[in-house]
Amino acid sequence: MELVCYVALGCLLALVLLYGLLELHYFLRMCLCVLLARFVKRRCHILETTTVNGLCLTNDVDTLLYHMNNARYFRELDFARVDFYERTKLYRTITRLGGSVFQGAATIRYRRFIRPFHRFKIISRIIYWDEQSLFMEHRFVRPADQFIHCIVICRQRVIDVSMDSVMAELLPKTAATPLQASRHTLSSTASMQPAGMAQAQAMQLPQTTLEAAQAENGHVATSTTTTTAYSVKLKPPLPPELCKWIEYNDMSSKNLRSGC
């Protein structure tokens, strides 16, 4: 009996040590997110949105125990990103091509705090990419009335591989037909575009529809050129607020390099 007590006490101390040194619940939740995204949740198109659910617990609140700590928002994004990476096969495609990805920059705009024990969901999507970077938008949304608590924009830097090459790999493989992908892209980017831009894109739809019909009938041959042109067609336009943020990041980088 005494031996059992010592074993139980040793296990308890080891558990406390793990929580103190490694924050065990974070790694356990991360493993759970990976398993759910890889084996339970459905696969997603690279330009689709993904959603993960969260709950503000006592270890997430601020000093006054009144609302979610500001730093916890970025921590919650780790789970949203791994869910997006797994369900779209983005991370596996980058590593398969010999590259790696890391967080390069992030900006957040708070609107209203999240109270303790209140549920929220994080809606993630790709809003733009260039040769070296992938730009993602994350929204913290209240499930009851879809109120947006805050909006985060993250810049994921990709090294040792071109982001255009990664998207050229993913876009044809995750779209059933060019017609379906074109319809999805028009609907997913309509909210970000001014009315004039949306009308201009709509004027190009008949040609896209014709190409899709030919592809469905087996008259269009796949090639590297076709794949590259196809990925360029599906690329979202650069949002104006993101353009300003990229300019700010470039100015900050130049200041750091010059020693300012």
Image (spheres, rainbow, N blue to C red):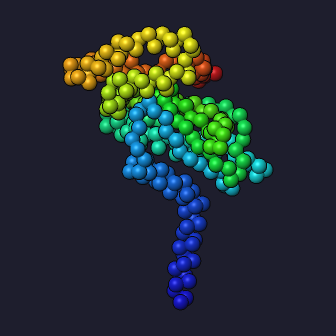
Q: Residue at x 49, y 18 (%)?
A: 237
Q: Quadrant of residue 184?
A: top left
Report x, y in % for residue 86.
41, 43
Decide if residue 80 is on the left or right side of residue 98. right
Report x, y in % for residue 20.
60, 60
Can residue 111 be seen from the camera position used here?
Answer: yes
> In this rendering, is residue 81 above or below 166?
below
Number of dots carrying numbers: 0
> 20 or 46, which is in the foreground?
46
Q: Residue at x 57, y 30 (%)?
A: 153
> 188 or 90, which is in the foreground?
188
Q: Quadrant of the C terminus?
A: top right
> In this rendering, is residue 149 above or below 188?
below
Decide if residue 141 is on the left or right side of residue 95. right
Q: Quadrant of residue 5?
A: bottom right
Q: Residue at x 50, y 57 (%)?
A: 28
Report x, y in % for residue 142.
65, 42
Decide if residue 46 is on the left or right side of residue 111. left
